[in-house]
Image: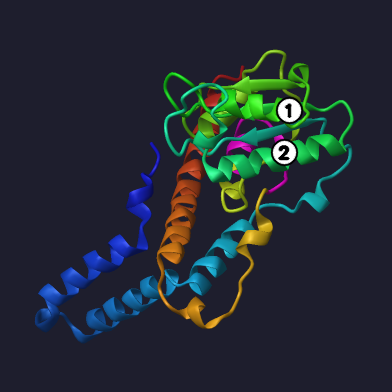
Amino acid sequence: MSFPIWATSPLLYAVVLSVLVAAGWHRLPTGVRCAGIAIEVLLVASMTPLGATALARAVAMRAPAARICPAPRPGTVVVLGAGFEHAANSPYDYGALHEAGLQRLFTAVALWKKLPDVRLVIAGGAGWTIHEAVPMANLAVQLGVPSKAIEIEDRSRNTWQNARNVAALSPPVPRRIWLVTSAVHMPRAVDAFRAWGFEPCAWPSDLPEIRVHVWPGAFIPQGSGAGTTTITLHELFGGVEYKFLAWRHARRAQAHTP
């Protein structure tokens, strides 16, 4: 099970809390009223660009930095897709790919070009007739990666399945990998790949985008801030879920060990 993205919207929580508190305001104890107001203020603050980027940065910093990746450096780059903006019309419909997925792919290809004789694994099964890993792979070829250096995993529907299915590829993917995905998504992705036996070195695709910038509009709730916080809360709740999945996976593996 994965949390739907709409279920982590701070705007949804703020509206629901306002309605509940307003409906029973005169019957609520003073302490409950104060707590409700405090939570409402935090929710509103999280929808400002300043609050949203600060929260996203705090979550992203939980992933290990690439510079501390121990030697020997991995010889495989694994990049995760981010879905489609709309259904792809063909395997070469690059415009259908989500912006975050394109950014991840560009980052992965740039990393691949720095390393000799490296394998590029593209994971993502979003879509129906055409799965996202296919246009991502075709775009990688257009960017200069030889097709023989690319392998795709196009059956997964979430990050947990990304890790599970990459672990099942043949020939096997080495346990030590470069893992490329969005910075906020990285902690959950690292947990998933570790659970399936990998030793991922994090290579985030968008760290510059989550720096905190202070300007007058940064203190005003905006759609962009609400969107960033929605994604960040989705990653936090999903991270808790993946901790449980990793624990359950480890228990099952122990039960099947002679």
Residue positioned 52% across, 44% down in the render: 243
- Seen from this angle, which residue lies furthest top? 170
**For this view, does 210 lie left or right of residue 50?**
right
Residue 7 horizontal/vertical position (percent): 33, 51
Residue positioned 57% across, 25% down in the render: 92
Dot 2 falls on a residue whose secondary structure is: helix
Q: Can residue 23 be found in the magenta stretch?
A: no
**For this view, does 80 lie left or right of residue 38?**
right
**For this view, does 12 lie left or right of residue 203?**
left
Q: In this rendering, is residue 28 above or below 141?
A: below
The crowding category of the residue bearing disc 2, from other C-alpha atoms within 10 Å (few below 14, some 14 to 19, many at least 20), is many
Q: Which mark is residue 108?
A: 2
| Region of the chain picked out in magenta, as a range | 191-204
Residue 32 horizontal/vertical position (percent): 24, 79
Residue 162: name its quadrant: top right
Residue 186 horizontal/vertical position (percent): 61, 47
Q: CA distance from mark 1 to mark 2?
A: 8 Å
Q: In this rendering, is residue 73 above or below 148?
A: below
Q: Can residue 200 be found in the magenta stretch?
A: yes
What residue sits right under mark 1 in the picture? 120
Most foreground residue, 150 or 183: 150
Marks 1 and 2, the one that precedes in the sequence:
2
Q: Which residue type carries mark 2?
A: Ala
Residue positioned 89% across, 37% down in the render: 72
Q: Is residue 254 visible?
A: no
Residue 253: name its quadrant: top right
Q: Which residue type carries mark 1?
A: Leu
Dot 1 falls on a residue whose secondary structure is: strand
**For this view, does 59 lie left or right of residue 139?**
left
- Seen from this angle, which residue lies furthest bottom? 30
